[in-house]
Amino acid sequence: MTEAADAQPACSGSLLVSVPKAGTHMVLKLYARAGYLNVGWGEVDPSDYRIPREQLARDLLQSPPVAAIVEEFWYLKPGVILDLLRDHAKIQIGDTKGLTLTGENAEPAVQAAWKEIRKLSDTTLFVPRLVVSTHQFSWDAGWRFLAGWGRTGVPSVVYCYRDPRAQIVSMIRFLAESEFMTKHPWMRVYRPILQNLGSMDRMLSFAISDSTFPFRDAYKQNRWLLYHPNVLKLRFEDLVGEEGGGSRLSQAAAIERWATFLAVDVPAEKLARGLFGGTATFNQGRVDSWRDVFKEHHLRAFEREFGDVLVDYGYAGD
């Protein structure tokens, strides 16, 4: 593992909004290699952290005013405070799924700590070297967060997306085949359905038409991020590099834009090395892999349902 001294502090914390199956883990690798601690959706292999995750967590808990809360509630384990901070960050952006310790049934000490953590503003929550990751962020779900962001520019917001046709194919394969998150409600509901349908032809027709298919509306809910001038946009197709069917030059340019946006001072070649693949939810990750399974009737159905998305995101006509 590279020494911690190689990682330079970033200008602020960051919010990563990444459509699922659109390179979330690739971008989180970049953050980890730049010395960021991730909370929220997605996991990072310990070997990808330039600074050990335990040290990053300690740094977060020692940053003011979080340190004052830790001191006041010294009898709570640091992991509890860290979980509460994560829940607070998720609530700030309207992501209330998967909250852990909060609620009326929590112990009195945890409820008291939660009350203090909820007082943290976004500028104090999103400290340097912290990235909060989520999959979709409707602007009207996090009005308090957006008020602070518009006023201070903190945190730095990054949006990652992929050709929606490739994304839906990848999501189908994930739900039908992956051994990751097997107890999640998505799997409980959709794995039996998809496996019963059997062929990719039938599964794809179902997913395109199903109004509740997981993250079906993510592209539309995240549309404001695509057009906002203060949000950095990253395309999966640019990040995958030659191993994923892209190009080395496009990958280098995308990483350079990301590093410049976050004031990350880590050599691009270190950030890019082994970026493609190697994560728990990875399947194929190939650019244009959707062409292998889409038939003419799928294309027509997708155009009816998501033609506006293809136009907005620049994939129409491909």
Image (spheres, rainbow, N blue to C red):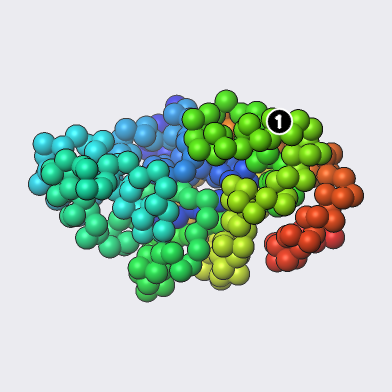
Residue at (54, 34) in percent of width and height? 188
Q: In this rendered view, identify the residue nearer to me: 113 or 252.
A: 113
Asked which secondary structure carries label 1, the reply is helix
Q: Amino acid at mark 1?
A: Asn
Residue at (53, 29) in percent of width and height? 182
Q: Is 80 left or right of 148, judged from the image as shown?
A: left
Quadrant assignment for the N terminus: top left
Is residue 125 depicted above or below 295 in this figure?
below
Residue 260 in view, yes or no: no
Quadrant assignment for the C terminus: bottom right
Residue 1 in view, yes or no: yes
The x, y position of residue 255, in whole percent, is 60, 49
The x, y position of residue 180, in whole percent, is 54, 29
Residue at (40, 43) in percent of width and height? 98
Rate crowding at label 1 as few (under 14), some (14 to 19) or many (20 or more) other CA atoms within 10 Å: few
Q: In this rendered view, identify the residue nearer to me: 16 or 211.
A: 211
